């Protein structure tokens, strides 16, 4: 690197040196890196930075890129590289008909909704990577006099400094992560969310790229080979980030649709506003004599529940894991959720837990654990008629004497030949948006 450090490099270097533990990646939009220095360091660093900036009117020294307006450049591409994807925009993009068809297939045959999700994720990855490549091409145009190992070190440090300045929820922040070959998860795990490790990470990343050029590109150090290696690093990170965020968002969306539709088919009344977690509210619902359900609630201990059913004095917790054989740890996590009762003050409610899992890899082990804790497990893809099995688990607990009629059981008895068709017609008439 040249003798005179860039403005961004000076800021970052002093931030990482501060060692007071105040600096974190959770900077808000109105914070700047200088404000996170030790108070006694701020005047010295500020004066030096201001002097350099005033005299050169630029951030970089000779043979180092001028990326003064890096935020503006990132913002220009943000909507195309890391566009925000909401649940409603996802439905609009794939079409409500396709979503309904996918949910119908899951409910009636145990099909995998991820086929639809994968198609959308793949489309977004292709588009995002196209614009990421365009951004990289634009950024590297500033190396007009060629590159050196020291100048590309400063290039990465500039991106790291911008990462510290950008709000963590911003699209610009996410692009910086991709350009550094990171995802948010990688930042948390590799660097332990410690900004003081970011500087050395930049040096290691730069070393890795030059080692790649040396090994696979005949040690031909030029802008094209650096650009090629940087694109490989950035595109892989961006693809991981997109898959991770879309998997989470689409998964939660389909969980709501599937559970909301299924429980409505069973005759339970949907409560959109989750009742307060106290004995008075629950007693009021119990005394109404009507079967209720609500979606996505959180207990006082912080444990999330995908759905809750209440009928008279009985409660059922429902957890759904729409994850296949590639994630065997999910059933093990779900096993810890079985409970036989709820206690509110001096009142105790009989309770049961039903867990829906995409694939029962160790079916006997999980079912034995469920029986031990008086719970139920239903494998969606293991049972073509899983929806009926799910309904039976619910009604056997809340209404063992059959005072509450299971609509699926009734339909199957009255129209055995038309059962599947009637079920599909009912699912297609559901208003999925009401569960958002």
Image (cartoon, rainbow, N blue to C red):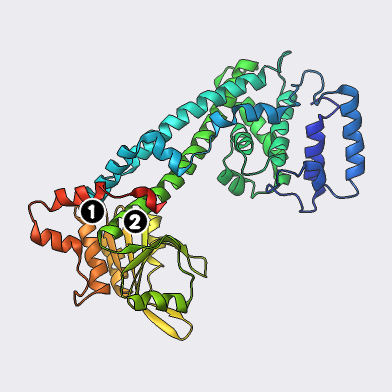
Q: Is residue 124 left or right of residue 322?
A: right
Q: How crowded is mark 1: few (under 14 residues within 10 Å), some or many (20 or more)?
A: some
Q: In this view, does 236 lie above or below 167?
A: above
> What residue is pinned by disc 2?
260
Name the image quarter holding residue 55.
top right
Is label 1 in a helix, a strand or a loop?
Answer: loop
Seen from the viewer's position, the closer of residues 30 and 383 is: 30
The image shows residue 328 at horizontal and vertical percentages of 37, 54
Q: In this view, does 426 lie to the left or right of 307?
A: left
Q: In this view, does 150 lie above or below 98?
A: above
Q: Is residue 99 above or below residue 75?
A: below
The image shows residue 167 at horizontal and vertical percentages of 67, 43
Is label 2 in a helix, a strand or a loop?
Answer: helix
Q: Nearer the viewer, mark 1 or mark 2?
A: 2
Residue occupying the far top of the picture: 145
Q: How crowded is mark 2: few (under 14 residues within 10 Å), some or many (20 or more)?
A: many
Q: Which mark is residue 382?
A: 1
Residue occupying the far front of the picture: 288
The image shows residue 314 at horizontal and vertical percentages of 33, 76
């Amino acid at each position: 690197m040249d003798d005179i450090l860039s403005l961004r490099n000076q800021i970052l270097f002093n931030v990482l040196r501060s060692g007071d533990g105040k600096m974190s990646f959770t900077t808000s939009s109105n914070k700047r890196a200088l404000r996170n220095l030790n108070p006694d360091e701020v005047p010295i660093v500020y004066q030096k930075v201001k002097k350099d900036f005033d005299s050169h009117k630029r951030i970089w020294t000779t043979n180092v890129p001028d990326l003064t307006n890096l935020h503006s450049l990132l913002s220009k591409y943000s909507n195309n590289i890391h566009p925000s994807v909401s649940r409603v925009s996802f439905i609009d993009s794939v079409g409500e008909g396709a979503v309904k068809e996918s949910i119908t297939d899951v409910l009636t045959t145990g099909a995998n909704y991820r086929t639809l999700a994968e198609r959308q994720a793949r489309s977004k990855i292709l588009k995002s990577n196209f614009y990421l490549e365009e951004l990289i091409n634009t950024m590297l145009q500033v190396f007009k006099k060629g590159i050196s190992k020291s100048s590309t070190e400063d290039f990465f440090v500039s991106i790291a400094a911008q990462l510290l300045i950008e709000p963590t929820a911003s699209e610009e922040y996410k692009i910086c992560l991709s350009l550094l070959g990171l995802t948010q998860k990688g930042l948390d795990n590799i660097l332990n969310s410690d900004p003081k490790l970011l500087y050395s990470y930049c040096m290691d990343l730069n070393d890795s790229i030059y080692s790649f050029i040396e090994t696979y590109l005949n040690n031909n150090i030029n802008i094209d080979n650096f650009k090629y290696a940087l694109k490989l690093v950035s595109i892989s990170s961006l693809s991981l980030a997109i898959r991770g965020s879309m998997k989470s968002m689409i998964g939660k969306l389909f969980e709501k649709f599937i559970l909301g539709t299924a429980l409505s088919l069973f005759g339970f009344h949907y409560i959109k506003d989750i009742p307060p977690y106290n004995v008075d509210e629950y007693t009021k619902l119990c005394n109404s004599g009507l079967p209720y359900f609500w979606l996505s609630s959180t207990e006082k201990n912080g444990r999330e529940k995908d759905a809750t059913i209440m009928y008279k004095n009985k409660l059922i917790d429902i957890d759904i894991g729409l994850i296949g054989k590639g994630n065997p740890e999910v059933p093990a996590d779900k096993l810890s959720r079985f409970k036989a009762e709820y206690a509110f003050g001096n009142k105790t409610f009989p309770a049961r837990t039903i867990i829906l899992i995409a694939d029962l890899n160790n079916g006997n082990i999980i079912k034995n654990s469920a029986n031990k804790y008086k719970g139920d497990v239903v494998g969606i893809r293991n049972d073509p008629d899983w929806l009926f099995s799910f309904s039976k688990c619910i009604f056997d607990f809340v209404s063992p004497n059959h005072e509450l009629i299971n609509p699926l059981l009734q339909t199957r008895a009255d129209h055995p030949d038309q059962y599947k068709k009637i079920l599909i017609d009912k699912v297609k008439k559901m208003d999925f948006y009401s569960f958002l």
